Structures are given as C-alpha cells and as structure tokens.
C-alpha cells in the first residue's frame, strides 16, 4: 500500500495544523474525508440536485437512481442478501434507536432482559435504558475480563430464559477488542434470541459479511468510513423489517393515507420517513469505492501492522499504561499516564499537531469498571504511518517532561 499516495487524496493533510503536519489519530471518533467524497457532495448540489423518490422529472429520477446505487454498494460491501435490508439513518445512534424502539414496542415487556456488555458505547446502552424506564425492561451486562475482552463463556453465563435480545459491539472503541460475533450469534440463535451488533468501529477496518455473521441487526456509522456526517446504515434481516413497526411517520414511508388509517410503504422506504440525507448518501458511494479500491484486507493488514508497532513503542515507554490486551484487537490505542490527566495529555499533544481524543469516549460504564475517570486514545485510519506513531511517542515524552515524570 502506498500510504503517501493515499494521504494525498485527503485535502486536510495538505495544510499545517498549528504549524505542524497533522498527525491524525482520532479516526475512531470520525475519519477524515477524501476529496472524491467532498467533490461528490459539491457536484450533486451544483449540477444534479433534486429530492429523491418523489417527482418524475429528469433530475429527480437521476438522483433517485444515485441514491439507490449507494444502497446496492452498501449491500455488496457488507454482503447482505438483499438491497432492501439496507436502511439509511442519520447515524449508527439512530440505527440502534430504531431497533430498540421498534423491537421494544413489539416484543419487550416488564421483566424481559436485554443483554449488553460493559464495552458498549452510550449509543448501544442509552436506547435500551429508555426501555428500562418506559417498560420495566432489565439490562444485563456481560462483564469484561482482565484483558478488556468479552469471552463467549461470559455471554453464555449471562443469557437467561428472560433474555429477549443481545446488543453487542463488534469492535470496542476503547480496548479495541474484536468480539467473536459469529459464535455469539450462533449461541443466541440456538436459544431463539436475536442479536444486534454495533459495527461502528469494525465497518471501516475489517471485512464484513452479514450472511456469514448471520446477525439480525448491524449498525454502521458512515462518518467513520471516510464518508459524510449525518449518515448511518442499519442492516436488518428482511424478516425483521417486515415484522417490526415503522420507527417514524411521515412522507416517504407510507403506502397510502386515508382519514381513518394508513398503510406502510414497501421496504426499505417503511423506515426512511421524510427527506433523507440525500447528498450524504450519494457521496457515501464514493467512500465505499475508496475503501474497495484499496481493499479492506489491505486496510486491515496495514492497521494491524501499525497497531503492533504502536503497542510496542508505547509498552516500552515507561509510565504509559495501555488499556486492554484482548485476544483479537483493532486499531485503537487507549492509555493513561499516572500523574497526568488525559485532557492534559491531549492538549499538549495537540500543540505538536498530534490529534487524539481524551475523555470516556462515550463509554462511561467501561471507565467506571476500570476505575478511570477518563483515558487518552490514539486511533488508526488508513492514512496513518509508523512515523505518526513515532510522533505520538515523541509528544508523550514531551508531555512527561512538562509534568516532570
Ligand atoms: C462504538 C460506537 N458506537 C456508536 C457510535 C455512534 O455512531 P454515530 O456517530 O454514527 O451515531 C460510535 C461513535 O462514536 C461508536 O464509536
């Protein structure tokens, strides 16, 4: 892989940040955007704009085709069986809310259990918490082991005859743990329990195959996949989309409307009420082409090599404590330094143009478990290099000097 060439596709790296070359290590938060994606948004608004799925004029039909082309590209990218299993949402958060709300409405009652893990992002906890408040549903937590990982045995232990759905991350945005989703789904299905997977951190980094994983729902965040903000994808097996009620009501999702009743539209329109993020959807096709052009296996290999290198140099750096040592790990390096608050680390690194994230990364339950108010996190993307990680280490050392460690 020619990273220099790939990096040149991202305009953000052309300029200095605070007089430094940008070392962007915050892709788990949101990735940078290649020019093709930005250009696609510009071109759509300036040359091709129309709303989709409504009018019959030339621009409207062309825009509808472009919008649907992205759906097909997403279907292929994740190897879903049917294009109608792809629903656009405003983010992974909305995708999970959609499932929690509709599944909760139809299938959950007081005393039923939702099994999540201690690794979950707030987006895969709070929507279920609402059901605790509104319906008296119980939330059970599969607990992390000392490596910041979730074992299949732990999942087995936490499933009861009250478990009605498992909602679980594929790749932790803090410990980097890649969970054995296929095994978890097999286990859950053997007990008749559906599985929702939060795929925000996996979709840009590892190969996805919905037919192989066999999960029921999979939530994706497009802005972490070199795509536009304001867009997510919910993959759901067709049987669920047919079975569950719509999430929101409005134009686009109806089949017919009378004074005394309504009929729902065909799939996937049933779940896409109102004017959607049209430009973002159309531009997201360029993100998928970008990922496909490089090849997800090449991206995974590249990031694994960087991850190993990053772990090696940070482990050698005394006083840096890496969080988690899971069996299978994706490109996330979360760490603490005794005596320096993560926000101070991030602020000092930023002075060198090294962009990382500090805080609880929307995983307060996990940080509570680890006994940490916050952590620092460097996360990898396709444009990162070993030099970026050297600069990270260099700035960490500078930080330690300032704090006289
Ligand atoms: C693991 C995980 N789940 C869910 C989300 C929420 O995604 P979105 O920003 O698309 O709503 C994020 C984003 O930070 C995430 O990292």
Image: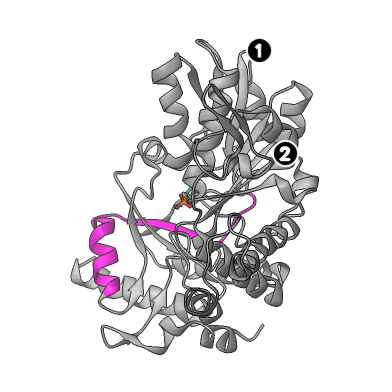
Magenta stretch: give its range.
326-350
Q: Residue at x 63, y 22 (%)?
A: 157
On the rendered structure, is 143 left or right of 152?
Answer: left
Residue 377 is inside the magenta segment: no
Question: Spatial distance from mark 2 to mark 1, Cα to Cα?
Answer: 23 Å
Residue 66 spot, x, y in % from top left? 65, 67
Q: Residue at x 60, y 19 (%)?
A: 107
Residue 375 shows in this picture: yes
Per the image, the residue denoted by label 1 is: 161
Q: Nearer the viewer, residue 44 or 153?
A: 44
On the rendered structure, is 382 left or right of 354?
Answer: right
Residue 16 spot, x, y in % from top left? 33, 87
| Relative vertical location of residue 3 with respect to residue 94 in this rendering, above or below | below
Q: Quadrant of the N terminus?
A: bottom right
Per the image, the residue denoted by label 2 is: 237
Residue 346 is inside the magenta segment: yes
Dot 2 beta carbon under 8 Å from ligand 1 = no
Q: Is label 2 in a helix, a strand or a loop?
A: loop
Disc assigned to residue 327: none
Q: Residue at x 74, y 41 (%)?
A: 182
Q: Quadrant of the C terminus?
A: bottom left
Q: Residue at x 57, y 73 (%)?
A: 382
| Relative vertical location of residue 340 with respect to residue 192 in this rendering, above or below | below
Dot 1 beta carbon under 8 Å from ligand 1 = no
Q: Nearer the viewer, residue 202 or 264?
A: 264
On the rendered structure, is 44 left or right of 270?
Answer: left
Residue 251 spot, x, y in % from top left? 52, 43
Q: Of label 2 and label 1, which has the lower sequence position?
A: 1
């Amino acid at each position: 892989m020619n990273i220099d060439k790939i990096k040149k596709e991202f305009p953000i790296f052309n300029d200095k940040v605070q007089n430094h070359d940008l070392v962007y290590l915050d892709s788990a938060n949101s990735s940078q955007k290649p020019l093709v994606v930005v250009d696609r948004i510009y071109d759509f608004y300036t040359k091709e704009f129309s709303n989709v799925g409504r009018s019959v004029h030339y621009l409207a039909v062309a825009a509808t085709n472009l919008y649907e082309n992205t759906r097909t590209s997403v279907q292929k990218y994740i190897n879903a069986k049917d294009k109608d299993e792809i629903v656009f949402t405003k983010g992974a958060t909305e995708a999970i809310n959609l499932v929690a709300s509709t599944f909760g409405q139809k299938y959950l009652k007081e005393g039923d259990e939702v099994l999540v893990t201690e690794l979950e992002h707030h987006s895969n906890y709070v929507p279920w918490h609402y059901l605790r408040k509104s319906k008296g549903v119980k939330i059970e937590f599969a607990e992390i082991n000392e490596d910041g990982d979730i074992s299949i045995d732990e999942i087995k232990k936490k499933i009861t005859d009250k478990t009605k759905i498992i909602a679980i991350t594929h790749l932790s945005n803090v410990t980097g743990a890649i969970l054995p989703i296929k095994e978890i789904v097999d286990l859950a299905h053997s007990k008749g329990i559906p599985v929702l997977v939060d795929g925000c951190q996996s979709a840009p980094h590892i190969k996805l195959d919905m037919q192989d994983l066999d999960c029921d729902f999979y939530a994706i965040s497009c802005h972490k996949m070199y795509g536009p903000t304001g867009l997510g994808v919910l993959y759901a097996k067709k049987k669920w989309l047919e079975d569950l009620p719509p999430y929101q009501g409005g134009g686009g999702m109806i089949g017919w409307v009378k004074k005394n009743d309504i009929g729902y539209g065909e799939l996937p329109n049933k779940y896409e009420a109102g004017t959607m993020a049209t430009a973002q959807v159309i531009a997201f096709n360029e993100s998928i082409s970008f990922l496909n052009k490089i090849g997800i296996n090449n991206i995974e290999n590249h990031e694994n090599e960087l991850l190993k290198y990053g772990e090696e140099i940070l482990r050698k750096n005394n006083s840096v404590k890496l969080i988690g040592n899971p069996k299978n790990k994706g490109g996330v390096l979360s760490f603490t330094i005794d005596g320096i608050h993560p926000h101070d680390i991030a602020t000092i690194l930023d002075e060198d143009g090294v962009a990382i994230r500090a805080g609880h990364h929307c995983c307060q339950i996990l940080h509570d478990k680890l006994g940490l108010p916050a952590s620092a996190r460097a996360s990898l993307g396709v444009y990162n290099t070993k030099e970026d990680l050297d600069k990270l280490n260099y700035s960490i050392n500078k930080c330690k000097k300032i704090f006289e460690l």
